[in-house]
Amino acid sequence: MPVSDTESAIRTGTEEIPFWHDPTKRAIVYQVVALAVVFALGYYIFSNTQANLRRQSIATGFGFLEREAGFAIGESLISYSAANTYARALVVGVLNTLSVAFIGIVLTVLLGIVVGVARLSTNWLVSRLSGGYVEILQNIPVLLQLFFWYSIFHDTLPSPRQSLNPMPGLFFNNRGFYFPIPASHPAFWWAGAVLVAALLVTFVLRRWARRRQDLTGKRFPVWSVCVGLCLLLPLIAWAAGGAPTAMDVPQLQGFNFEGGISFSPEFAALLLGLVLYTSAFVAEIVRAGIQAISHGQTEAAMSLGLRANLVLTLIILPQALRVIIPPLTSQMLNLTKNSSLAVAIGYPDFVSVANTTINQTGQAIEGVVLIMVVYLFFSLVTSAFMNWYNKKKALVER
Amino acid sequence: MESSAGLTGTADLKPPATNVGAIGWLKKNLFNSPFNSFLTLFILYCLYKTLPPFLQWTFLNSVWYTDGAQCKLAEGACWSVVSRNFRFILFGFYPYEQQWRPAVAIILLIGFLLYTRERRHWNRRLMIAWPIGLAVMGLLLYGGFFGLPMVETTKWSGIILTLLLSIFGLTAAYPLGVVLALGRQSKLPAIRTLSVIYIELIRGVPLISLLFMASVMFPLFLPEGITIDKIIRAQVAIILFTAAYIAEVVRGGLQAIARGQYEAAESLGLDYYLKMRLIILPQALKIVIPPTVSILISAFKDTSLVVIIGLFDLLKTTQVTLSNPEWTGFSAEAYLFISLIYFAGCFSMSNFSRRLENELRT
């Protein structure tokens, strides 16, 4: 038979096949060509850039980080002045980005869960209103929303002298939002330390209760005991420290307010815009997650005699979370990345500081590379953490 | 159950008045539990407090077509900021007497989109008509024939730029995204690694960093003497950005195709190119149409970011209007107006995607 003849010929290698018909050799050629094209393009860009930089006599390297920045930053978590280095200015920017992202993510998740659950409410008014919320906020660009809130805070609020004063000690004006805080006193430090201790006790108690339940089947009311501990113990510490009630109330001094705690209109607009926009997406994710759990699960849990809150915490939530977590992670990352829009409304986040640095030093490449590296780092850390959490929550199959 | 006679008797009874009609609806949907009744009353109270003042501001006390000075006297909204600057907000620096051209192009585009909405119109002719239609719109905007004066692309601004960036962004990013997705699924390690690095790198950074790259770094990449228009550089950044997201969507589609399909194609003796073109991609791309529409929606919204590098899109022309001393302070009205434009675009696209999802669920 001719077929088996050729086959055996190929198998024994007596008949050479041309290399363009050999998949393994072809694969090598494809890959070499692809790599060569990428490297050639990279080299072309690199050499052009080198030539351009030399011609325009732009400095290269990260030496500028050590130089004096010479620009002020409106709000900063660490001490900073114009005399500090660019490196410190960029650190201030990173911290500002992180604080917006962190507060934003916490608020977004809370608001998103509320709206997502409200969309499934049997109350017609509630479900329609939350549906409208989701549709409207999802479909308007987040940058436009930021501009809108910023213009509201900046244009419509009065000047510091005519501040809105909705409650005693509370002042809203176009320079910021001022809230009173308790005046500093050692009792608050003690209460804080006690709270940390109470949280540690909670952690230990929870593990013990779970082990006891596994061994004996007896349940321990961990939740109510721990909430009680975390509230009562700090309160006792505060009372023992002399129960200070003095408040640090913002006061109008000259053109602006001093004291208390304040948020700038830029920060408030950025946070509000990001939280409202992202929470609309989170609400859809939460709704989809809850709807993905079939009603039979609830019925089965109830027929086992579980109470409504146990049905939710033991049966529904663990399954819904599995559906919710991956898209929720990407929304958290989106919020972090969108916080870079701060540059448009003048909040000094990392991109904004880096942009100023680029404009002052002219070292665009280093600046853009820094921005990319920092955001890549945020993204990788967040997704690594969420992957770990997701794996912990994943379905354990046989 | 008392007796069968009682049961037959109830069949003729009408349901209680409180269970049908308007009262029944209210009882079922608004007051079905104490907590829901409380929520309903609370929301109605909030609406009562906020809605009338809002309506008064929007309609009753508002002014519609006055100059800025009169607006400052009005108590309500100043819609004049929109009506007086309508054409600048929409078309920006496009020459005033020539603005019928973008208007015609946009009407043409909307017509195309409405026609394409119906799935029974999808065929080869439409696939050919789309590029021709886009080219006609482009030529109409650019001019230089039939006595139409030429309009430089640097003058294309307002909604023209927004639509241009998003539509060209998606059309050019789509093939690139498909290639990247195939690369990521490829068995060849070098090609797979390159695709993974590209996709993860782009998805890990904000669009704004790519736009900065396009505006400040890109000119340094080119040999001396060659300059590329800023609009095109921003367009390239948007294409590169969108392609990474499309690649991930298409990868989802490729992974959803059963292994048997790949094996069947191979057993027919098809090579890689034919296998993908005839068997895998037609199925995979069909599955991912709805998520692709979501990407189009985000691309449409994301084009507003070009404001930050100083291009005159819809958002920027609005801000230019607002920076005119006559109209400063009416930003809420102007922003509400363009929100409406963006909302109309995004909402109709997301409705379309939802409908498609239902139709394609086979």
Image (cartoon, coloured by chain):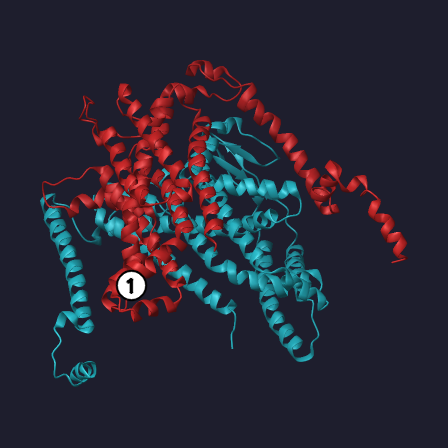
Q: Is residue B129 left or right of residue B61?
A: left
Q: Is residue A85 visible?
A: no
Helix or strand or loop: what does disc 1 sit on? Answer: helix
Q: Nearer the viewer, residue B109 or A57?
A: B109
- Chain that appears red: B
Q: Nearer the viewer, residue B221 or A223?
A: B221
Q: Is residue A53 left or right of residue B159?
A: left
Residue depicted at x 27% and y 60%:
B195
Q: Is residue A112 visible?
A: yes
In which quadrant of the rendered view does residue B145 lie? top left
- Chain that appears cyan: A
> Residue B26 appears at what percent x and percent y?
72, 39
Q: Residue flagged by tag 1: what amino acid is it? A: Lys
Question: Which chain's residue wears label 1?
Answer: B
Q: Nearer the viewer, residue B9 or B46?
A: B9
Q: Nearer the viewer, residue B165 or A144?
A: B165
Residue depicted at x 16% and y 86%:
A12
Q: Is residue B49 left or right of residue B353?
A: right
> Residue A376 appears at what percent x and percent y?
33, 56
Placement of A112 over or under A1, stated as above or below: above
Q: Is residue B251 left or right of residue A248?
A: left
In which quadrant of the rendered view does residue B269 lie? bottom left
Mark 1 = which residue?
B275
- For the N terminus of chain B, which image quadrant? bottom right
In which quadrant of the rendered view does residue B14 lie? top right
Placement of B97 over or under A247, stated as above or below: above
> Residue B179 appears at what percent x and percent y?
27, 56
> Residue A328 appears at what percent x and percent y?
48, 55
- Label 1 neighbourhood size at 10 Å, few (<14), some (14-19), many (20+)? some
Residue depicted at x 64% and y 40%:
A125
Q: How many marks?
A: 1
